[in-house]
Amino acid sequence: MREAGRVVASALLQMRKHAAVGVSLRELDEIARGVLAEHGATSPFLHYQPSFAHSPFPAVICASVNDAALHGIPDRYRLADGDLLSIDFGATLNGWTGDAAISLTVGTPRPDDLRLIDAAERALAAGIATAVPGRRLGDISAAIAAVARKAGYGLHTDFGGHGVGRTMHESPSVPNDGKAGRGMKLETGLVIAIEPWFMAGGNDSYRVDPDGWTLRSGDGSRAAHVEHTVAITADGPRILTAP
Ligand code: MG
C-alpha cells in the first residue's frame, strides 16, 4: 500500500507545484493521469459511481475551488489570483489503493484561507496521532472535531474518512466528528483514510451542484480538505501517502 501511496504523494506534489494563476483544473487532471501512466497505476476515481451520484465521476482528481469543499469536477476553469484549491487524488497499484488530499492557495493568499488550511492540516495531524492500537475510532473523530470547534469552523459528518485497501472506500467509516472512547477499537493492520474538511463560515450545512458531485458550503464560505491514508502499526501511525 505504501507503493500506491507514493504514487499519490508524487502526483499531489506535482499538481501543487503546477497550480498557478491561469492554469486550468483540467491541466492538473492531465498531470495526475501522466503520473498514473508513468507508474502503471490506475485511478479509483475515474468512472466511480457511488449510490449518491447520478453519473460516474469523469476524472482522476477532484478539484474543488473556494466554496467547493469536495468532489469538484476538473473542468476548463482557470485558477485565479487568491483562489483556494483542494485536490483529492487516489491511485491503485498492484491491487492496492492510496487516497490523499491537499489544500493550497493560488497567487496572493487570503490570510483567512491560510488559517482555514492550517486548521484542517492540524486536525489531520491530530487525527493521525490518535490512530494507534488500543484507541477507538471515536477518538480520531473527536480529535478532528476539537480543532474545528476551537477555530470556529463548520464541519459535517457526511463524507469523512474510511477504510482503504483493495478498494478506495471500505469499512469502517471515520466521521469527522464523534465521541471519544466510542466506536471500533483500532488494531494493528487496519488502514484508514483520515480526511477533515472544514467550512470557514462556521455552519455545518452544505449543498451539491446540479452536476451531482460538487459539494459546496451552504453559506458560500470557503472550504478546505486534507487527507492521508494511514496504517495503524505497533510502532504507531504510518502515513502511507507521505512524500
Ligand atoms: Mg478519501
Image (cartoon, rainbow, N blue to C red):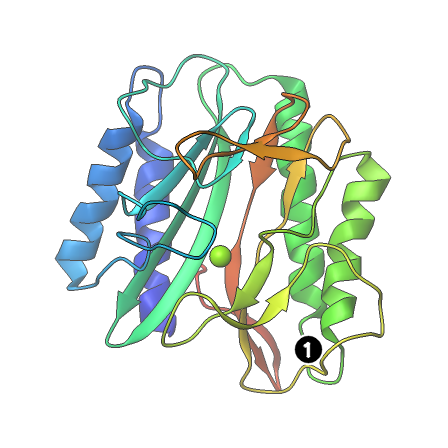
Seen at 33% across and 45% down, the residue is 55
Seen at 45% across and 22% down, the residue is 106
In this orientation, does residue 26 appear?
Answer: yes
**Between residues 211 and 34, which one lies in front from this camera angle?**
211
Q: Is residue 199 above or below residue 54?
A: above
Residue that badge 1 annotates: 132
Q: Answer yes or no: disc 1 within 8 Å of ligand 1.
A: no
Seen at 76% across and 35% down, the residue is 153
Residue 190, quarter of the rendered image: bottom right
Could you tell me the amino acid type at mark 1? Val
Q: Position of residue 139 (x, y in %)?
A: 78, 68
**Between residues 63 and 107, which one lies in front from this camera angle?**
63
Q: Is residue 229 above or below residue 59?
A: below
- Secondary structure under badge 1? loop
Seen at 48% across and 43% down, the residue is 102
**Between residues 52 and 125, which one lies in front from this camera angle?**
52
Q: Position of residue 174 (x, y in %)?
A: 64, 64
Residue 36, quarter of the rendered image: bottom left
**Between residues 79 and 56, which one lies in front from this camera angle?**
56
Residue 187, quarter of the rendered image: bottom right
Q: Position of residue 47 (x, y in %)?
A: 27, 52
Task: Count all numbered tags in the image, as a single digit.
Answer: 1
Q: Is residue 111 left or right of residue 142?
A: left
Quadrant showing the C terminus: bottom left
Quadrant showing the N terminus: bottom left
In this orientation, does residue 193 appear?
Answer: no
Q: Is residue 45 above or below residue 40?
A: above
Q: Position of residue 43 (x, y in %)?
A: 26, 57
Crowdedness near tag 1: few (<14), some (14–19) or many (≥20) residues, C-alpha within 10 Å? many
Q: Is residue 75 left or right of residue 89?
A: left
